[in-house]
């Protein structure tokens, strides 16, 4: 960014946007599966410095993920907020640009609190005045745009994610701030806090070479003596002041160092409920990435089956393309359709396992993993659902778009070929792996 430029002007950031668009233009998106697009978004587009233009770049990434390129039209099948959550919480692990932007700005709050002698810190402090030892007052300028106001507005959100590391004790308020490993002393001992005088004093002002120098308003009552003893025992393990200055200690890692990725991870976890989600069965299964992305859509019940197409205002024949008996939904097509159930029965009988078909895809992923405990080959067992679902989807699309129908035995053969190919990738050092899979079936 040019020196002296208006940092809030979108024109200044056009270079970043153009850089992003040029990268997209070079990629042959028409040949990329969703698995390939996911890899490129996470490894390349997320690496750009983007906190000032998050909405624009989110739009670019969203369009690239769902549509591939500007010429293609495509449905956005899952809400973007759900896509940008972590894989363990049901998303794709694509970075949430708003949270990432906050994490980048939080870094400046940490630097301001800990770097007391830097020139930029002294300039900000002189302009906005300090509220306490750690931060300036809230910026309330009635005119213009203040970059520091945007950063300072995050302080109340980020402050609880720090604790204070005691150095010389000149900055940390004994009662008011969280410096003890057990937590904030005012909160832990409100009764003793009310007894204490000089409640705004720092640790350095209350500490002497002989120990703590507390002054109370009155003698403690009999029922307060035990609490006072508990309080004194808790703070009695303090080892004394150090030569270095007090500093903020980041709770996100053991070293206490603020890291942008650590801040992002904390905010992402705090902003999302952790659902019961079969993420290992989707992403840890050794299958092609595009198939994992497809199974993720199935688990979200968002694949473009007839019911989901109709929700988008397109009128089609609502019957299942495989059985022709009922409305085509994700759970019907991939679990309960009589055509699909024949495939399930074939593979279950080959494995010698009895299994009750669950109602939903997510339940199927969980129960399939549990049933595999007695399977002949657990690695192969884990990828059987993916091979069935991928073959079913190709057969469904063949009937829908090409008018070509195949028998259950033909689709079974396709499933076995997929299993052989994927197992061969898993056992790449074993030249007989395909023969072994066929023999075991």
Image (cartoon, grey):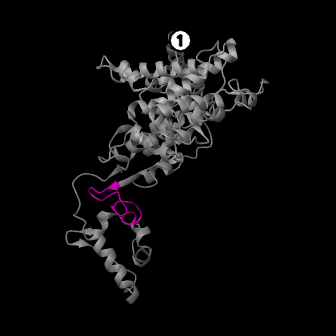
The part of the image, by quadrant, that contains residue 280 is top left
The part of the image, by quadrant, that contains residue 146 is top right
Horizontal side of residue 128 vs 220, given as left or right:
right
**Residue 303, above or below 33:** below
Residue 8 in sight here? no
Label 1 belongs to which residue? 31
The picture places residue 101, in percent across and down from the top left corner, at 50, 35
- Asked whether 177 or 85 is in front, the reply is 85
Q: Residues within 10 Å of mark 1 (few under 14, many from 20)?
A: few
Q: Magenta stretch: residue 362 in it?
A: no
Q: Which residues are magenta?
A: 164-184
Q: Residue furthest left?
A: 209
- Quarter of the image with the C terminus is top left
The structure residue drawn at horizontal position 59% and vertical position 32%, both measured from the top left corner, is: 298
Residue 155 in sight here? yes
The structure residue drawn at horizontal position 35% and vertical position 22%, both measured from the top left corner, is: 436
Q: Magenta stretch: residue 176 in it?
A: yes
The picture places residue 265, in percent across and down from the top left corner, at 44, 41
Q: Main secondary structure of the magenta part?
A: loop
- Asked whether 72 or 35 is in front, the reply is 35
**Residue 282, above or below 200:** above
Horizontal side of residue 232 vs 368, given as left or right:
left
The picture places residue 431, in percent across and down from the top left corner, at 30, 16
**Residue 160, above or below 298:** below
Label 1, secondary structure: give it.
helix
């Amino acid at each position: 960014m040019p020196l002296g430029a208006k940092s809030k002007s979108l024109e200044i950031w056009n270079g970043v946007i153009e850089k992003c668009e040029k990268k997209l233009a070079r990629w042959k998106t028409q040949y990329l599966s969703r698995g390939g697009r996911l890899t490129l978004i996470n490894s390349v587009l997320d690496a750009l410095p983007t906190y000032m233009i998050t909405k624009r770049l989110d739009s670019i990434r969203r369009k690239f993920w769902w549509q591939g390129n500007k010429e293609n039209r495509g449905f956005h099948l899952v809400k973007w907020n759900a896509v940008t959550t972590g894989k363990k919480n049901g998303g794709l692990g694509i970075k949430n640009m708003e949270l990432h932007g906050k994490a980048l700005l939080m870094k400046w709050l940490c630097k301001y609190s800990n770097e007391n002698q830097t020139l930029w810190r002294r300039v900000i402090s002189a302009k906005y005045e300090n509220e306490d030892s750690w931060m300036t007052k809230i910026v309330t300028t009635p005119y213009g745009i203040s970059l520091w106001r945007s950063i300072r507005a995050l302080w109340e959100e980020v402050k609880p994610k720090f604790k204070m590391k005691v150095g010389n004790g000149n900055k940390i308020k004994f009662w008011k701030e969280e410096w003890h490993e057990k937590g904030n002393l005012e909160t832990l001992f409100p009764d003793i806090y009310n007894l204490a005088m000089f409640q705004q004093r720092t640790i350095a002002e209350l500490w002497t070479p002989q120990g703590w120098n507390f002054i109370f308003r009155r003698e403690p009552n009999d029922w307060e003596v035990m609490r006072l003893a508990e309080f004194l025992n808790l703070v009695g393990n303090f080892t004394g002041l150090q030569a270095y200055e007090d500093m903020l200690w980041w709770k996100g890692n053991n070293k206490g160092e603020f890291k942008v990725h650590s801040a992002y991870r904390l905010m992402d976890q705090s902003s999302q409920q952790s659902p019961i989600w079969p993420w290992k069965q989707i992403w840890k299964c050794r299958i092609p990435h595009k198939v994992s992305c497809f199974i993720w859509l199935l688990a979200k019940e968002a694949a473009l089956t007839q019911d989901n197409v109709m929700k988008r205002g397109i009128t089609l024949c609502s019957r299942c393309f495989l059985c022709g008996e009922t409305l085509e939904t994700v759970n019907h097509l991939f679990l309960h359709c009589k055509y699909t159930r024949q495939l399930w029965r074939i593979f279950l009988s080959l494995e010698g396992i009895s299994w009750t078909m669950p109602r939903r895809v997510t339940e199927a992923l969980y129960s399939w993993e549990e049933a595999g405990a007695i399977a002949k080959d657990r690695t192969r067992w884990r990828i059987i659902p993916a091979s069935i679902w991928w073959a079913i989807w190709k057969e469904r699309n063949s009937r829908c778009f090409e008018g070509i129908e195949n028998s259950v035995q033909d689709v079974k053969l396709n499933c076995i070929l997929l299993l052989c190919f994927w197992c061969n990738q898993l056992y790449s050092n074993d030249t007989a792996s395909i023969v072994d899979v066929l023999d075991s079936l």
